[in-house]
Image (cartoon, coloured by chain):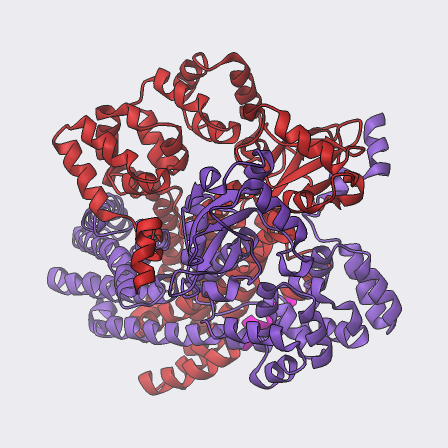
Chain colours: A red, B purple
Amino acid sequence: MGEISDMSQKGPSTEESMHVFVDTRAVDRVRADIAAQDADNLAKTLAALDPADAADVLEQLSAEEIQAAARLAPDAFGADILTALTDNAREDILEVLHPRHVADAIGDMESDDAVQVVEDLDEASRAEVLSRVDPQERQALESSLAFEEDSAGRLMQREFVAAPQFWTVGQAIDHLRDVPDDTLPDTFYEVYVVDPAFHPVGTVALSTLLRAARTTPLAQLMSPLRAVVTPQTDQEDAAYLFEKYDLPSAPVVDQKGRLTGMITVDDIVDVMKEEHTEDILAMAGVHDASLADTVFETVQSRAPWLVVNLLTAIIASAVISMFSALIAQVVALAVLAPIVASMGGNAGTQGLAVAVRSIAAHDITRANTRRIILREAGVGLVNGLIFAAIMGPIAFFWFHSLGIAIVIGSAMLINMLIAGLAGILIPLTMKRVGVDPAVASTVFLTTATDVVGFFVFLGLATLILT
Amino acid sequence: MGEISDMSQKGPSTEESMHVFVDTRAVDRVRADIAAQDADNLAKTLAALDPADAADVLEQLSAEEIQAAARLAPDAFGADILTALTDNAREDILEVLHPRHVADAIGDMESDDAVQVVEDLDEASRAEVLSRVDPQERQALESSLAFEEDSAGRLMQREFVAAPQFWTVGQAIDHLRDVPDDTLPDTFYEVYVVDPAFHPVGTVALSTLLRAARTTPLAQLMSPLRAVVTPQTDQEDAAYLFEKYDLPSAPVVDQKGRLTGMITVDDIVDVMKEEHTEDILAMAGVHDASLADTVFETVQSRAPWLVVNLLTAIIASAVISMFSALIAQVVALAVLAPIVASMGGNAGTQGLAVAVRSIAAHDITRANTRRIILREAGVGLVNGLIFAAIMGPIAFFWFHSLGIAIVIGSAMLINMLIAGLAGILIPLTMKRVGVDPAVASTVFLTTATDVVGFFVFLGLATLILT
């Protein structure tokens, strides 16, 4: 006990430093400062927090509140906080900050962070801000912006440490001590060893460099490169390489294979979080979401998918209406049809989710595609048999009709087989035509299982019951 | 051009070293080796690949093929490949490897990797393997295994670098050079500075250490700790801290706040990938998935959710059957009812996906819960108004009935409002009762929107049309 209280004087205790949860009292203070229009206090409140915590606190506010805060105390929004904010919150703030202020903040950032800020500005503000940035930095920013969004070129920083392969450990360390601070990254984890044409040929971890004898040649110490990225590499592919090879950083090379930048794992962690959110939202049909969005903005981002869903629902209903006369005679069909469609939709969604993740992880290849398609068809067939065997008897006891039992059993079997195939074939086709399988697969799948489910069920009923 | 061909002789070219895609030719070779029962060639094929690439190749095989490979050439499955494999593929292999072999491989691993392997063994094999491991290592493994699965205690390694705060840079570097290799982590990115009671009080990045003068005291050089983890911390919360504070590693402290281990970012990247997959699968109702699974295993992992879905679909159908007499008179109701249910389900799923990600990111707190619930209710209301205004006229022209148009418009409005509320309230309730919101929220949501959709639509029809 004594030790714990002792510690709280020397440094943060475990509880205090574990900012897993947002400091809601700080949110209240910020709100109060905004309400009182107290710029000094607001600046103090934010400055007292770790920039990452300050960003978390600001992200709790609505878009109007964030903008009110930025108008009130623009100087409180320096490079650190702007870097730590999510894209959505940062965009809200950049709308109200003066271009001069944004340019100053960018001047204090590492090149990769600066790109993240500038890329979110609209054309006019971007030009305005860039015109106020130091010419050399502006040029670097413009060449990064020339790479596509979500490419490694946007993530990379221009600062990195390279050493020729004929250097010794001592020479590398002396060089690191001699170069001026601003030509080095804030933090780096390895030295890239380059050949005379500036092609990276290996890496030496700083932990290895520190422990080696000064006379050891780097060429002898270096590990072979496990992965190299180009500025054109998709950020998801870059993340895949970091995950696969456990990299702390990766060298970025230009078209001639020359070292031109570095991506560090902290940026990859951000990419992974972003992709995780995008995938979950895409599969639910949401384009983009920020908690700060208003009702109107939220409706705008969600309505397109709902319109598409309305169209597919109408198509499925049109299938039902083809069988109106039969339904008027046998109302049980109207009761049971949604069960057939729903089970197909759910079984298909299961296979779809597995396929989407496997495709993203590059786990589905030429070597196993056939086996996996066959497996999903097999799963659909077995599921169909199981649920036909369950649902047939239920329908029989519910409606006292052997015919209805046979119809729903057969329809379940066929629809779940189709669902199994659709769950794997739709995302594979999306991938092949270059569309993110997470984005539009769900709508095609449920359309297929609804239309097939209703048509097969009511069609079989027409054949068997009339 | 000359430079590129030059480079291919000196080191891997960009294309070659970018193993974004699995080497399917190596998969073919492995398959051929298994078919030919050629143990030597199989071992050579695997040894020629980077362990991470070899793991990727093996993950392309079916469970039976992987096990055949492990039986054929057990010695090819050393510490490196076992560490690089996914849990599912590794489990398949561990089933056929001799405990002595597994124990040897574990002896070659870092403590955190060893835990990942041992935790997947069943009770009997675990005891068998642990009895063959070096006693000191066994004790370390057992104390890690005492922590819950998916906790930081399972991720941490016992090897780390700590230095007292009164040391100088020179003393720290000399210490690093003097300690034997096997007491240090393979790679590390920072030195933890500790007080006399071994509480971490700061960190010094190796890049800072390398560039500082030998006489500088560490206390002067160190950055304050931004995050500390305990072995009990959930791995998702640990990942949240790494993402928030851009950490390359985090110190793990015991109950008395003393430094006891370290978590590195490469493990966090693996956790993030795992959680990403789990979330996508959980929202689709899949418990666990491996591409190597057979049809039978796959059905087993997906059937429970389908049974639950069948029950909820039957409940929804029971609601429809309450209105059988009306449907027999007005068949248009059977045609339109699925549209009302489907639009509610989709609108609710959108809000649900946003809520699930926001809760996982700790973005929903006391400070903004009320605003977000009100927003989702507002979104539901506006969506309801929009789609009532679209669907009412469509129904009118389709069935030439003002009554039906009014009924479907009103039902859409009510169901989409309920869907909006359910999409936020269900995951918040799950979180409060300690259930992962990704896991079971979908089933509750679709049950709610189906039951409410059918009941309100058919109930209003009873009131207005009869």
What number of labels is visible? 0
Q: Is residue A215 above or below residue A122?
A: below
Residue B88: image quadrant is bottom right
Q: Residue at x 52, y 45 (%)?
A: B167
Q: Is residue A275 left or right of residue B390?
A: right
Q: Main secondary structure of the magenta part?
A: helix
B43 or B428: nearer the viewer: B43
Q: Quadrant of the N terminus of chain A?
A: bottom left
Q: Which residues are magenta?
A: A374-382
Please tell me whether residue A380 belongs to the stretch shown in magenta. yes
Q: Nearer the viewer, residue A194 or B412?
A: A194
Q: Nearer the viewer, residue B85 or A454?
A: B85
The picture places residue B409, in percent across and down from the top left corner, at 20, 51
The quadrant of the picture occupied by the C terminus of chain A is: bottom left
Res B445 → quadrant = bottom left
| Residue A237 can be seen in this image | no
Q: Is residue B119 above or below residue A122?
A: below
A347 within the magenta span? no
- Which residue corresponds to the image point at 77% horizontal and 60% vertical from the top-left? B27
Q: Position of residue A330 (x, y in %)?
A: 32, 75
Q: Is residue A373 visible?
A: yes
User: Residue A430 versus residue B355: which sits nearer the camera?
Assistant: B355
Vertical position of residue A279 compared to residue B300: above or below: above
